[in-house]
Amino acid sequence: MGELKRLDLEYNQLTSDKMRLNVGPQHPSTHGVLRLEVVVDGEIVTEVIPHLGYLHRSFEKYCEQMTYVQVIPYIDRMDYISAMNNEWVYVMGMEKLMGLKVSDKVEYIRVILAELNRIANHQIAVATFGLDAGAFTPFLYYFRDREHIIWVFEKLSGARLLYNYFRVGGLAADIYDGFKEDCLNIVKRVRKTNEELMDLLILNGIFIKRTANVGILPPDVAISYACSGPVLRGSGIKYDLRKDEPYSIYDRFDFDIPVGDGEVGVPGDCWNRNIVRVREMEQSCRIIEQALEQMDMEGDVKELVPRRVKPPAGEVYMRAENPKGDLGLYIVSDGTDKPERIKARGTSFVNLSVIPEISKGYMFADLILILGSIDIVLGEVDR
Amino acid sequence: MESINFLYELLGKNALTITLVVILPLGFVLIYALVAILAELKTSAWIQERLGPMRTGPWGILQPVAEVIKLIQKEDITPAKADKLLYNAAPFIVFTGAYSAFAVIPFSEYFAPSRIDLGLFYIFAVGSISALGIVMGGWASNNKYSMMGAMRSVAQLISYEVPAAIAILSIVVLTSTMNLQEINKLQTGWFWNWFLFGGPGTLAKWWIVPFTIILCMIYFIAALAETNRLPFDIPEGESELVAGFHTEYSGIKFAMFFFAEYAYMFVVAAILTTVFLGGWNSPFGNLMQGPGWGVFWFIFKGFSVVMVQIWIRWTLPRFRVDQLMYLGWKILLPISFVCFLIISLYVMLK
Amino acid sequence: MGLLNRLDDPYEGGGIVLGKIEDILNWGRSKSNWYLHFGLACCAIEFMAMNASHFDFMRFGTIPRTSPRQADFIMITGTVTFKMAERIKILYEQMAEPKYVISVGSCSNCGGPYWEHGYHVLKGVDKIIPVDVYIPGCPPRPEAFQEGMIKLQKKINEQAIFNKRKRLKKEQSDDNK
Amino acid sequence: MLTNEIFEKLKSEFGENILECNDQQPVDHFIVVKSEKLFEICHTLRDDDDFLFDYLMSLSGMDLNENLGVVYHLYSMKLKHKLVLKVMVPKTDPKTPSVERIWRTADWHEREAYDLMGIEFTGHHNLIRILCPYDWEGHPLRKDYQTPESYHGMKTSS
C-alpha cells in the first residue's frame, strides 16, 4: 500500500515541461522580421510575447529632417504593399491643413489607384495566408494577377512597388492612353481568379478545417484593441471609413462593406477575416468600374501642386481606410517647410497587438495561421 | 515456387550474382530519385504556370545531377551540442529503411531480389525503421524545431501504419498469401483481375468491388502520410517548423534524407502497384505481356502513383497535427475495419 | 553552359583532368543554388514577385530553403537595423560552406534612403558579413534580380578549387602585365 | 458632440483639471487637461453615455521643447464623434498616468512613447522598450537627442 502511495505521489509530480520557442526574426512565415517568443506545452500555445523593432527605420525622426515633399517616399516605405494608399493619407492630411481642394479628375484617379492597390494588397494577404496553410500554388496564381496591377502603376509612376506618385494638391503625372482598358482588364482578371481560387483554396475542405473556429476575436475585444480593417470587420462589425465618414469622393459610389458573417465557422475567426478580404476585392472592382464610368478625362492633374509646400502652423489627424485598416497620420506643422512632428499610427502595429490575446490555447500551427490572418507588414509595425 | 530470378538462372547462385542482385535496385533507386526530383520540379512548375529549371542542360533536365554534385561539395555541419553518434547515424538509418524494402519488390516475373513468403510483412516491418531514423535525427540535432518535427513524425507513423496494414491485410485475406510475387501472379489477365477491382473471380465478386476501391484509397492516403508528403507533411511543415526534423542537416546527410523520401515514395507506390494495380501484369490480357514488358508496366504504374503524389502536394493545403490524428484514428481506421470485415465475409461465403 | 565555354581555355598547372573536374564541380554549384530568403523589407515583396510565375526565379535552378544549413546563398532583401544585424551574422555563420551572400536593394547595400539621419539603420550589410553580389535599386526590378543571379553563377564558375595558389599567382602576373 | 461641448461638460465634472479648449487651430480642435486626474477623465470619456469614446485611434508622444506632451485621439464607434485630448508633462519628470486599463490598445502605444520619447506612464504593467533594442540608450525622438557613435561595435553613422 505504501509503495503504491509513493508511486501515486510521483505520478502527480510529473508535469510536462513547457518549451520556449523562438519564432523569428528569421522564420518562413512571420511575414517579415517579427519575433514571437512562444511558450508551448506540447503543441498547445500558452503564451505569446511579440518582440518588435527589427525593422525600426526611424521614420518619424526622418520626417522631422525632411521637407513636406520629401516625406512622401518615406511614407511609401511604411506599408510597402499598399504604397498608394499610404501616400493618399498623407497627401489628404496636407491638403486639409492647407485648405486645398483638388479637382474631380484627381480625386477619381486617386480612388481608382487606391482601390487597385487595395486589390493588390489583399491578393498578397490571401496568398500568403494560403502559404501559411501549406498551399503554395494559389500564392503564385495571385501573384500572376497582381503583376497586371503593378504594370499599370509602373506605366503611371515608373516604379513597381514604391510609387512616389501622389503630390500635395494633385498627382505627379497624368494618366496615359489606355488606362481605362487596362483597369477594366484587371477587374475582369481579378474576378476570374477569385472564382477559381474559391474552389482551390477558400472553400477547400482542409483549408476550412484549418482556419475556421481558430483565433476567435470577439467584437468588444477588437474595439478595445482598436483593431480596424478586415480584422475588425471579420469580427462582424460594420466599420469602414469609406462609409462611416466618407472622405474624398467615396459617397458617390455604390458599394457594400463585407463583414465576417459566420458563413463558415464563427465571426472573428481566421476564415472570416480572410473571406472579408476576398469579398472586398469584389467591392473594389465595383468601385473601379463606377469610377471609370463617371470619370472626366479632361483637366490638369498638376495645376494645384505648389512649388513649395509650406502649410500654416497647426495640426491635423488624418485617417483613411487602408487595405489593412485605418492608417492615421498626426501631422503637426509649425509654419516652416519641415514638419514639426509626424506620428504614424500604423495599422499593423495596432492590429498585431491582439496576437497575445487571441492565440492562447490554440495549437502551434494555428498561431502561424492567426498571424497570417491578421495580415501585418513589418514596415508599418516598426516604422 | 515456379518463378525464377533471371540472374540466378543465368549466372548461378554465387557471390557475383548476389552482389548484382543487390546493386541493381540501388542503381534503380538512384536514377529513379533523380527523375522524380526533376518530375517534382517540372510538375510543380507546370501546375503553377512557370517553366521550372531551364538553364541546366536542355530544358533543365540535368538539374538533379547538378544538385547532387552540389550537395556532395557542401560542408557537413554537426552542431556542437548535438548527439554526434545518433546525429550521424540517422540519415543512414532512414535511407536503409527505405532501401531495404526494395529487397522484396518484384520488378518483373523474372526479377525480384528476394522472394520470401512474408514479403508484405517484411515491408511493413522495415518501413517503420525510417521513422526511427527520423526520431533519432530530430532528437539528436538538439534543436527544438527538429524535435517537434520528430515527435510529430512518430505520432503520424503510428496512426497511419494501422489503417494501411489493415487495408493490405484485407487483400491478403483474398489472396491467402503474403508473397508479393504470388499476389502478382494471381492478377494475370485483363485489368479487371486486379485487386483494385476485386481480384480474379467470377462475376459474383461485384459486391466487393466498391470496398476494394475504398481500401486502395485508404492505403494511398495512409501512404501519403507515411512518406510525409503534403497534405500530411507536418513533420517538416515549412510554415511552422522551419524545415522540421532535418533543420540542422546539411550537405550529403541532407541529401540522404532527400533521397530516402523519394525512395520511400516509390516503395509505397510499388506496394500499391503490386497489391492493387496488378504489379507487372499488362492491363490488356496477353497483349504486351512478357519479361521486358513486365519491368515496363511495373515502373510505369509505380511512377504514375508517384506522380499523383506530386500532383497532390502542389494542390492541397496542409493538415494540422490533431486533425491528422483524427483522420487516421476516427475515419480511416473504422472504414478499413468495415471493409476488412466485408471482404472476410466474402471469402467465407465463397 | 559554363562547362562548354571553359573547355577551350588553356589550363595552366592543374592539367586538363583537374581542370575538367573543377569545371564539373563548379558547374554543379553554380546551377544548383538553394537560397535562404532573408526577407526584411520592401525588397522582399519584389522578390516574392520575382519568384512568381512571370519571372520564375526557379529557372536558374534555385530552390528556397528555410533552414540556413541547407542554403547555398543568402539573400539579404531590405533594411538591416542594428537590432537585426547580430542575427544576420549568426545566420550567416550557421550556413554551410561554400556560401555566398547577395545583398539586395539600396538599404542593404549602403543604407539607401536611410543613410543619413537615422539612428537605427546599419549603413550596409557588408559591415557585418562579406557580400558577393550587390543588386542595386529601391527596390530592384525583377530583371535586376536575374542579372544578380547570373553574376553570382559567373562568379562561382570562375572559382578555383584545386591549385588555388598557382591560379592566384597567374592572375596576379596577368594583372601586372 | 463638438469639442467645446465636451469641454464644458468635462469642466463641470473635473473643474480645474481641465485646462483649456483650443478651437482656434486651423484644423483640429483639442482639449488640454492636467495629468493628475487623467485616468479618471479618460474613464469618464469612455463610460459616460454622452461620450462613449470606446476607440483610441492614436496615442502620440510629443516633444514641445520645454515640455513633453501626450496626445490622445479618441473616437466613438456608437456616437461617431471625435476628440483630441492633450496632456503636458515637464521634461525633468515626465510622468503621466497610464490609460492602458481603459483602452487596451494603449499598451503598445505607451510603450512606444516611452521608448522614443521617454515619457513614463505610471501604472503600466510592462513599460519596456518596444522598437529600439532593450539596451539602447536615450530616447531618439526627443529634439535634443544625440545619436550615439556606435552600437555593439557597429558605427551608427555612415
Image (cartoon, rainbow, N blue to C red):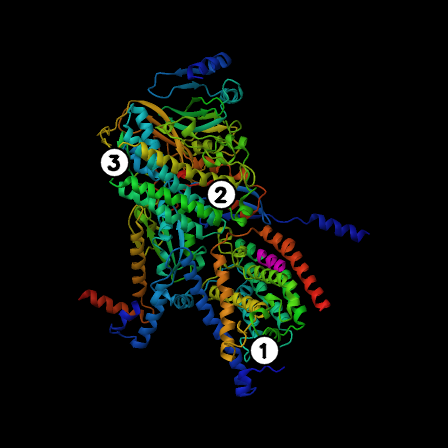
- Residue A172 - label: 3
Within 10 Å of disc 2 (Cα), the crowding (few <14, some 14-19, many 20+) is: many
Q: Nearer the viewer, residue A16 or C9?
A: C9
Structural distance between the alpha carbons of marks 1 and 2: 52 Å
Residue lying furthest left = C177
Question: Dot 1: few (<14), some (14–19), or many (≥20) neighbours within 10 Å?
Answer: some
Which numbered marker is on residue B114? 1
Q: Is residue A178 visible?
A: yes
Q: Position of residue B44 (x, y in %)?
A: 43, 58
| Residue B279 screen position, x and y as percent | 56, 72
Q: For this rendering, which residue is in front, B280 or D66?
A: B280
Q: Tell me the residue that label 2 is attached to.
A: A371
Which is more N-terminal, label 3 or label 2? Answer: 3
Q: Is B247 left, or right, of A338 in this rendering?
A: right
Indicate which disc residue C71 carries. Answer: none
The magenta segment is: B151-160
Q: Secondary structure at mark 2?
A: helix
| Magenta-colored stretch includes residue C156 | no
- Give the residue type that dot 1 points to: Ser
Q: Is residue B154 magenta?
A: yes
